[in-house]
Amino acid sequence: MPVHRTGIELVGMGGVGKTTLARLVYDDVQVNNHFKLKAWICISDEFDISVRSKEIFIAFGGEVKKEHENFNKLQEAIRDHLTRKRFLLVLDDVWSESREDWETLVSPFYTCSPGSKIIVTARKDKLLKELGYNSLYKHLESLSDDDALSLFALHALGVRNFDSHLSLKPHGEGIVKKCDGLPLALIALGTSLRTKKDEDSWKGVLESEIWKLPVEDKIIPALRLSYHDLSAPLKRLFAYCSLFPKDFLFDKEDLVLLWMAEGFFQPTPSDLTKETLGQKFFDELLSRSFFQHAPNNESLFVMHDLMNDLATSVATEFYFRLDNESGKNIKKMKLDKYRHMSFVGEKYVAYGKLQVLENTKCLRTFLATFVGEVESRRHFFLSNKVLTDLLPELPLLRVLSLSGFVIRELPESIGTLRHLRYLNLSQTHITHLPETICNLVNLQTLILFGCKELTELPNNFLNLKNLQHLDVRDTLLSFQMLLEISKLKSLQITLSKIKIESERGIEIAKLKDFKNIYGKISVVGLEKVQHAIYAHEANFSEKRLSELELVWGDELNDSRNDMLEKEVLNELKPCHDKLIKLKIRSYGGFEFPKWVGDPLFLYLKHVSISGCKRCTSLPPLGQLLSLKELFIQGLYGVEAVGSELFGTGQAFPSLEILGFRDMCGWRKWSGAVFPRLQKLEIRDC
């Protein structure tokens, strides 16, 4: 299987739209139906074959085990996983020019089924020529003048031409010509002009001195102009993102918390909280294309490489990103001026790499970052001397992130960092927190997500009066312990699971004390709730939940009261203006309460109902305007699917994926029109 027979090559300069075009192909309905497996991997300039191979294996649904630390074993596992399967793999932004590395990477693919494809996006064609692509591809060209003008008008004026804005057309044509047909530049600059309809503003952009600056630093003038159009607060927030390496995937909520910890938000006379203000700023940068949705994870975000270059160029001398290149010259640099520092995590981070930071007494930010998404199977080791010797030398730290490292305990000296506002210990191996952490009276955010060995919190945890955000998803902290710390008035707690264990299920009533619980939560063991009033007291309608999973026991026996379970489910109705995902499992009622399928849930996109064996009918989910994915499984009592599912009016206006499984009693289907359906699966029915 010569690689050039399976490859589709998209070559062109940065910002021309290679990734966007690949994304359109990747998401196409016919493409989805054609390939059994799909994966998208961002390569960029860090081409570690072992790391990329693991990412590919995981993206294709493989499970990395300890034995796969051996690279040969890993390649064998990839080969076995892909044998006789037709796959699509996108390798986005390939910088490597090593033929040997490439052939090693793709060698496990040779057992796949015919028709498998690899899409490669790259800025240079040297590697492709060596692999024999010479006559099989051509460079992706910039947009034509007409298409460029249309795209610019769309983002600047909201229409695809200048027919209603003839006075602006000459200036628009001049600006478009200077953008050289690059979509990223056209979109960014067009968006910056969308609130300005006067000729002077457009003329000012066209005649700006920035167009005349040399482009030695690879920053496209149009992107500089779009940056200069930002307000002062937005410029500061964007410059902060220079701490992120290329292809770094970040979460909106987490970035806003970082900005807050750095003190970037000034008090406003309006009713906006600092967090709400930060979210508005984030959305503005997103709308102007400074940020983009991550191609393989809709909940995360990324900066285009050119935007990352722009952030680095506009960042002041206070920002420093320690990576492989900057690390070579770090000893020659004057570090005492820096206030914000990040470093890219490697498998082993030795003390020597960071020792020079002992001279940065005024450092406010010490941020560990990683390229791509860090899955729990990857291990990163940090020298213990960094914790014991270096951190006490940084007394002014406001932000400290050690996320993803194999750290088993923190030193007592952590309590000396009195200015600390943000502490991220997610996916570390800590079993407890030192009592001195309770001295951090300015701490606003504590992230313990994925600390699967953490069983307790310090005795004086309630001393953290300013704590506003606590993320304890996927930890072993007890419900009773979390109930105790919920007494902190301003605290928002992000949980992953609440397990009901008492005979009467009264624990659920105590959720009323979690006034600021938000995010994603799973409630397990609901069959033990003996009175619906307990569920009522939990006050779910006031919780700001984006994802809710409600789980009863799998065993459906005579002790299960169908009317009681319907009453309990009815009382667990969540806040309708926040919910995005809903899962209901092993519910024992014969029918669903009215809130399941209520069109008031305007943002609900994903619904899964499974194992509800007594149910004889489905709820009117067709009325959910934003619903994109619906999975129904194991509802043995449902014999007909029809009007009760579709509701009134046009049904499922946004539904793209519909799946039915294990519906052994299903006999009749009264269909409806699904205007946007892309995938339908019916199995074991």
Image (tube, rainbow, N blue to C red):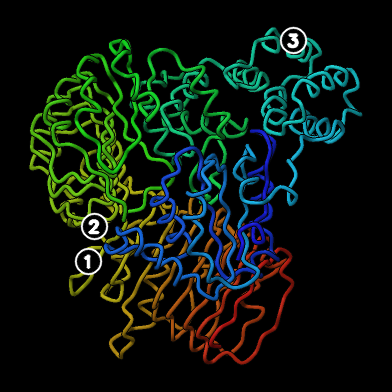
Q: Nearer the viewer, mark 1 or mark 3?
A: 3
Task: Give how far apart the Cα atoms at labels 1 and 3 are.
Answer: 67 Å
Circle 3/circle 2 CB separation < 8 Å = no
The amino acid marked with disc number 3 is Gly
In which image quadrant can residue 54 be found? Answer: bottom left
Give the side of residue 142 with respect to residue 388, left or right: right
Residue located 38% across and 25% down the image: 321
Q: Amino acid at mark 2?
A: Lys
Secondary structure, mark 3, is helix
Q: Earlier in the sequence, mark 3 or mark 2?
A: 3
Q: Are marks 1 and 2 in contact (CB under 8 Å)?
A: yes
What residue appears at the point 48 percent right and 59 percent down from the top-left corner?
581
Is residue 61 found left or right of 191 in the rendered image?
left
Residue 448 image offset from top left, x and y in percent: 25, 45
Residue of label 2: 510
Residue denoted by label 3: 204
Residue pointed to by mark 1: 506
User: Seen in the image, is 470 located left or right of residue 116?
Assistant: left
- Residue 12 locus on image (x, y percent): 68, 38
Asked if disc 1 and disc 3 are in contact, CB closer than 8 Å, the reply is no
